[in-house]
Amino acid sequence: MEKRYKLASALLSASLVMAACGGADENPDSSEVDEVVEENEEFASTEESTEESNSQSSGSTGDTIAPEDLNHDAEEAVNAASENFDGELVEVELDNEDGQWLYKVDMESESEEYEAKLSVDDLSVVEEQTESDDDFDTDEHFSYGDAVPAEEAVQTAMDETNGELEGWTLDKDDDQLQYEVDMKNGDNEDSDVTINAENGEIVETDD
């Protein structure tokens, strides 16, 4: 109702200006006011429908996430965690926890281990913890720069399974740096794609 009054007021003001210049009647027909109001309401309704449609077409659900909905990449998450802890990288993960998509970054030093959970939206720290550690295993350490970008590994897994992303993990297994990418395929079944993180090639796919 308030919008109708504002639009009608704007139309009346414009009409008075035109009347002063000799270009319109001083008293506009009320039907003209209603017509303008209806046109503006239809336009606003169309905009709202378009915005809702765009938000629904992102490709993300509660269980899966579309890569384009990640505002920050994995490297940025690793860099953000490294600003809070001086240590070696042990594991990086993308996961949905209690309905929130997070990057999890695990690191360790000679005396402590550290885990940071960062929002994929703005890389804010959702949770972090540090505890003593006397098991400093250099065989588990790696640099994110030694791996193909997570986004490239995800695209490889999506092409292989024609599915949607449920999450991934990057770490060393038997001295091999690899991604484990969790996918949900078109039949709503889970698939795990193991990718050699050093060259980006698929090692195996488990349905």
Image (cartoon, helix red, strand yellow):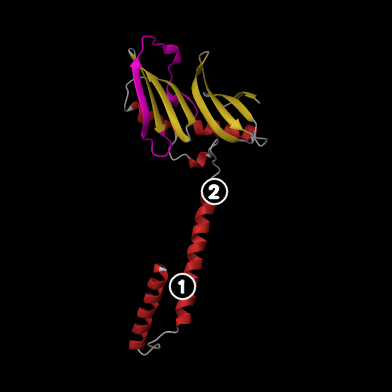
Work out whether residue 190 or residue 86 is closer to the camera in this orientation and state it: 190
Q: Which residue is mark 1?
A: 37
Q: Give the residue type that dot 2 points to.
A: Gln
Location of residue 62 with respect to 79 vertically, above or below: below
Location of residue 20 with respect to 90 vertically, above or below: below
* Residue at the farthest right position: 187
Q: Position of residue 58 (x, y in %)?
A: 53, 45
Work out whether residue 80 or residue 47 is closer to the camera in this orientation and state it: 47
Q: Position of residue 19 (x, y in %)?
A: 36, 87
* Residue at the farthest top position: 134
Q: Quadrant of residue 180?
A: top right
Viewer-side label of 2, 1: 1
Image quarter (top left, top right, bottom left or bottom right) of the C terminus: top right
Q: Give the residue type that dot 1 points to.
A: Val
Can residue 199 be seen by looking at this rendering? no
Compared across the picture, whether 14 is left or right of 157 comes to left
Location of residue 41 with respect to 174 vertically, above or below: below
Q: What span is in magenta?
A: 119-148
* Residue at the farthest front position: 1
Within 10 Å of the Cα at label 2, are there few (<14), some (14-19), or many (20+) other Cα atoms?
few
Within 10 Å of the Cα at label 1, are there few (<14), some (14-19), or many (20+) other Cα atoms?
some
Residue 129 within the magenta-colored segment of the rendering:
yes
Tell me which label, 2 or 1, sits earlier in the chain.
1
Mark 1: secondary structure? helix
Q: Which residue is mark 2?
A: 56
Mark 2–mark 1 distance (CA, rounded to whole Å): 29 Å
Who's the residue at 46% across and 75% down the image?
Answer: 36
Can residue 50 be seen by looking at this rendering? yes
